[in-house]
Image: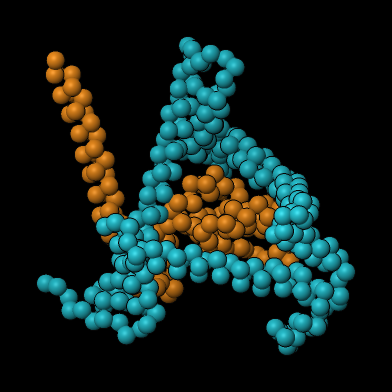
Amino acid sequence: MRGLGDFGLIVSLSAGQPGLKEWILYAGDVLDVPLAGGCTGVGAPQFFPYYPLQILGLMSALKGAAEYEAALARGHPEFTAANQAATRGMGPQSAAHLVIVAFILLGNAGLVLRRLARRRSP
Amino acid sequence: MIAAIHLSGDLQVWIGALLTLMVFSFLWRDNPFYKFAEHVFVGVSAAYWMVMGFWTTLWPALVLKLFPAAGRWSSPEAPVGAWDPVALIPAALGLLMLARLWPRLAWLGKWPTAFALGTTAGYSLVRYLRSDFLYQIEATIGTGLAPTSAGRWLWQESLAQLLVLAGTVSGLIYFVNTREQRGAYGRVARWGLLVLMITFGASFGSAVMGRVALLVGRFQELLGPWLGIL
């Protein structure tokens, strides 16, 4: 083992800089070392274009971690974590998303009603 | 039925929980507890990066090259390296950077700044050109519009490739301002705008998802290790 090029796989679990982006720029693309990563939901959109040519896979945010746990349980049950922390977190996450969607719908409904009221008023 | 509360006896858990509540208190209004947590966060972050910078950059890249015997202090078993006089150059540039602290010598600080900016720009240009430009072009059109596998046409991949290509080209056309966006050309540009809006929406949605995941994590810590309800 003399350098990064001798690695069989690089997995970067990171948030912010330096992180997965730097591993793509300075390791994966330069040395042709297979690269995979895990990142926060905020940073995920900037990594989507790199899949599948420059990164083998991307585990983004809690959702990605829950998907990873599910895939691990299906493919390698012997490595399945007992607490399934990410999968358990998806319940409150989904509830929070529904609340956000409800607020968006309420806000838009309010806007439409206000416009209709403005049109009707002389 | 409400589960019984079993408060943690771990000091670390208490510090984390109290700092979380102090930050949440900003939802009520700005207050001394929030200010305290904010200052602790800034102080700890600054100290962490300073220590990390010293042990991961200054120590191996400068101190150990100028004073190889110092390595015995941090790693007694590690072999002592050779003295590297080239390290005197970054040492001198680093000292020049500190000249900015004295107004009369501040101009000396421009040299290391110029060196750092120039080398970083030159080094990054090649990397970004390869990763964010050439490889992205390859990813967009590299596999062709009708990929096959074992003689079978992959229609789903073909559709995805077509969408990516159409979205990329129309998005680029939207930013061409040297031609009036009317007629068929204008419709393509509007399609490009739609693709951009969908992209920004997905990006924003992902950011919201990430923030909610952080909130869920904090509540899991509060209700789990701290209160023992979960």
User: Relative to B1, is A4 on the left or the right?
Assistant: right
Work out whether A71 lies above or below A79: above
Toward the viewer: B27 or B129? B27
> What x and y, as percent, mark residue B35?
39, 63
Residue located 38% across and 73% down the image: B16
User: Relative to B142, is B194 on the left or the right?
Assistant: left
> What x and y, as percent, mark residue A22?
62, 55
Q: Colour of chain B?
A: cyan
Work out whether B4 lies above or below B155: below
> What x and y, as percent, mark residue B151?
56, 40
Q: Is residue A114 visible?
A: yes
Q: Which chain is orange?
A: A
Residue located 18% across and 22% down the image: A118
Point out the image quarter for the N terminus of chain A: bottom right
Q: How is the image coloured?
A: by chain
User: Relative to B191, is B111 on the left or the right?
Assistant: right
> What x and y, as percent, mark residue B90?
79, 62
Point out the image quarter for the C terminus of chain A: top left
Q: Quadrant of residue B191?
A: top left
Residue located 45% across and 51% down the image: A42
Residue located 61% across and 68% down the image: B50
Q: Quadrant of residue B87?
A: bottom right
Work out whether B166 lies above or below A16: above
